[in-house]
Amino acid sequence: NAGVTQTPKFQVLKTGQSMTLQCAQDMNHEYMSWYRQDPGMGLRLIHYSVGAGITDQGEVPNGYNVSRSTTEDFPLRLLSAAPSQTSVYFCASSLGRDEQFFGPGTRLTVL
Amino acid sequence: DQQVKQNSPSLSVQEGRISILNCDYTNSMFDYFLWYKKYPAEGPTFLISISSIKDKNEDGRFTVFLNKSAKHLSLHIVPSQPGDSAVYFCAAMGNQFYFGTGTSLTVIP
């Protein structure tokens, strides 16, 4: 099992550009989520999904969109990147309200 | 407003001694608590958890204590080893996961 995979590992964007961060898991987990990690702020939940076709907002959803068309994939879309979205992004999955397995992260810089 | 707080950004401990990491929360509806360990340039990895119906859970060198009346949990690592040097996050589960800001543990050989 590959676990949770994220692509790309690194990305540099200009303000106003859009992009999609990819996340996939092969553990048949229903629960998937996206976090951002910023210095002194810990991990903050952006969006999460409890199953295919179901998504909900976390603590910091503004500027991000998600969709969940399959159990395996949970992409995160930045519609119009801003410097405040410079961060490290982690995707995670779990069977339910249980321990989460995290991907290796995507380091995003917005200039 | 931070619902899960780790008030100590860093902690240094001698190898072989006990490391105690603390975490406070504000929401009494949280019913499941977890600790994660994170090395630089990697994703967090699960360490240990505890349900709100328990007050202690042990797994090898790691023990988590939960004091519901004080809304406080702690992670004890005994004995501490240099490989334990990492950032530790506590997390609480309500309708979603909430993470603390992390404590950077350094174990000095």
Image (spheres, rainbow, N blue to C red):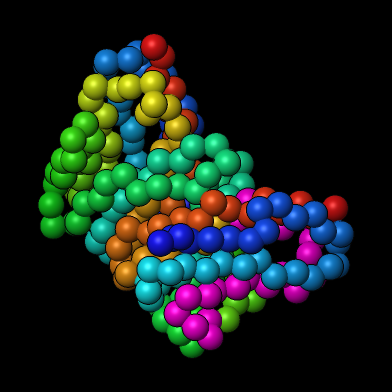
Q: Is residue A42 above or below residue A17?
A: above
Side of A94 relative to A103 (left or right):
left
Q: Is residue A69 magenta?
A: yes
Side of B14 relative to A59 (left or right):
left
Please name whichever residue, B28 or B89, is drawn nearer the observer in this view of the structure: B89
Give the residue at x 27% y 42%.
B73
Q: Is residue B71 above or below residue B82?
A: below
User: Can residue A54 be seen here?
Assistant: no
Side of B79 relative to A52 (left or right):
left
What is the residue that sits farthest to the front in this orientation?
A1
- The spot of residue A57 in percent (x, y) is 53, 74
Q: Is residue B57 magenta?
A: no
Give the residue at x 46% y 68%.
A25
Please name whichever residue, B69 or B42, is drawn nearer the observer in this view of the structure: B42
Give the residue at x 42% y 81%.
A51
Side of A108 relative to B60 (left or right):
right
- The spot of residue A65 in percent (x, y) is 64, 76
Q: Is residue A66 above or below residue A23?
A: below
Q: How many marks?
A: 0
Q: Quadrant of residue B58?
A: top left
- The spot of residue B106 in percent (x, y) is 44, 22
User: Can residue B78 be seen here?
Assistant: yes
* Image: magenta residue range: A68-89
Please name whichever residue, A23 or A108, is drawn nearer the observer in this view of the structure: A23
Please name whichever residue, B46 or A35, is drawn nearer the observer in this view of the structure: B46
- The spot of residue A26 in percent (x, y) is 43, 69
Give the residue at x 57% y 41%.
B41
Q: Quadrant of residue B27?
A: bottom left
Q: Quadrant of the N terminus of chain A?
A: bottom left
